[in-house]
Image (cartoon, rainbow, N blue to C red):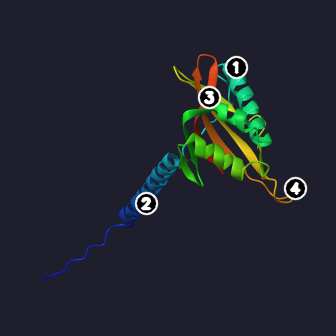
Amino acid sequence: MFLIIYKLPSVYTEKIQTMKILKFIILTNTIFVLAACSVSKLKPTIETQAYIPDSQELHDKIVSLDSVYFHAYNTCDMALQDSFYAENIEFYHDKSGLSTSKKDLLESLKKNICGKVTRELVKGSIEVYPLKGFGAVEMGSHIFHNNMEKSDAPSHIGKFIIIWKQTGEKWQISRVVSLH
């Protein structure tokens, strides 16, 4: 077997080298562009808008109810708290789970909260949305202060959701989600 080696003129070898470099640059740029597109899909831009109530009247009503209820909560007015809770209350708490007994919920509040804990609303945090044919949903942030600890003990912000049921002119708390 014979092996014949041809030597290409230098003009052709330079063109081949230039073509290899161009292919490398094109391939590298293509990979870079595809990677950039993939990353942009992984990190979507999130735009938030300032909360504007659907109904200022409804918002003001629920904020007022929140204030009255939590004044009763902070002052241990158990009769007023009782009147706020619907008979079929569902109270979801991230630490203690689900409670569906109004009686048990009120007993727990009297035993564990009265004189021991106060709630402070984070000013401006309440958002209210209508629930057509039912009432409204309230969402916000609050801080619970343990009155059994020193006054400088740190407190943490928690989030809450309250579903308000409207029956005629009467508003009651039917569902609560409390997250600390």
- Please name which of the two marks, 4 or 3, marks the residue nearer to the observer: 3
Dot 2 lies on which element?
helix
Location of residue 74 in the rendering, given as x and y in whole percent from the top left corner: 78, 42
Distance, label 1 to label 2, CA atoms, is 62 Å
First of labels 4, 1 by sequence position = 1
CB atoms of marks 3 and 2 within 8 Å: no
Tell me, for residue 24, which label it has, or none. Answer: 2
First in sequence: mark 2 vs mark 4: 2
User: Mark 2 or mark 3, which is nearer the start of the sequence?
Assistant: 2
SS at circle 3: strand
Count neighbours of disc 2 (C-alpha within 10 A) and say few if under 14, some if 14 to 19, many if 20 or more: few
**Residue ID for mark 4:** 151
Which residue does the numbered mark 3 point to in the structure image?
172
Q: Which residue is mark 1?
A: 56
* Disc 1, SS: helix
**Which residue sits at x=46%, y=58%?**
28
Q: Say which element carries label 4.
A: loop
Identify whether 168 is placed above or below 155.
above
105 versus 81 height, above or below: below
**Residue 1, image x, y percentages:** 12, 83
Report whether residue 146 is seen. Answer: yes
Q: Between 105 and 96, which is closer to the camera in this rendering?
A: 105
